């Protein structure tokens, strides 16, 4: 008997993080953009704007995925990316006086917290 898509449980079937194309669109390309900011030699405000856009895109992907399949990681990482996007957006506009060092810390903290948001899935379960 072969396994069909209909035999896959709903949450797993609806999980974008389990599909290569969705992973690339929602998280792979924006993550590559964030990681390449230093290589692009953009101005601080342009770099911050690029990071703000990437974090916003990843936050939307996580939050939509949480609604689709109730993935625990996405319930955590969505707000984390959204908070990172807000800080990056404030840095890009210059409204909050975020300096490059604080901006770098915020980007790194966002990435580490998003990575750590997988931990509850290891301890608890993948889908809420």
Image (cartoon, rainbow, N blue to C red):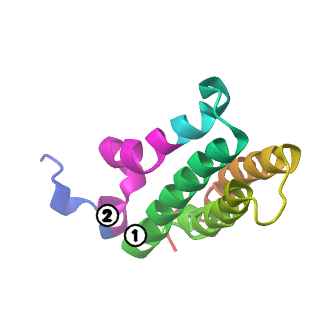
The answer to which quarter of the image holds residue 46 is top right
45 sits to left or right of 18: right
Q: Does residue 1 appear left or right of residue 34 in this picture?
A: left
Residue that mark 2 sits on: 14
> Looking at the image, which residue is at 79% across and 49% down?
103
Q: Where is residue 66 in the image (x, y as percent from the top left)?
A: 47, 70
Q: Earlier in the sequence, mark 1 or mark 2?
A: 2
The main secondary structure of the magenta stretch is helix
Say if mark 1 contacts mark 2, CB within 8 Å: yes
Mark 1 to mark 2: distance in Å?
A: 5 Å
Q: Residue furthest top?
A: 39
Image spot of residue 52 (x, y percent): 60, 55
- Which residue is identified by label 1? 69
Report the span colored magenta.
11-30
Q: Which residue is rendered at x = 68% and y = 37% of the image?
A: 43
Q: Does the magenta stretch include residue 54?
A: no
Q: State left or right for residue 80 relative to residue 56.
A: right
């Amino acid at each position: 008997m072969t396994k069909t898509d209909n035999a896959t449980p709903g949450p797993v079937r609806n999980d974008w993080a389990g599909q290569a194309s969705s992973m690339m669109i929602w998280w792979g390309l924006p993550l590559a953009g964030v990681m390449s900011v230093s290589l692009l030699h953009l101005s601080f405000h342009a770099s911050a704007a690029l990071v703000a856009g990437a974090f916003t895109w990843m936050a939307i992907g996580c939050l939509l995925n949480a609604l689709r399949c109730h993935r625990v990681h996405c319930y955590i990482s969505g707000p984390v990316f959204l908070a990172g996007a807000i800080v990056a957006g404030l840095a890009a506009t210059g409204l909050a006086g975020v300096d490059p060092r604080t901006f770098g810390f915020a980007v790194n903290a966002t990435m580490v917290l998003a990575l750590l948001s997988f931990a509850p899935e290891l301890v608890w379960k993948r889908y809420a």
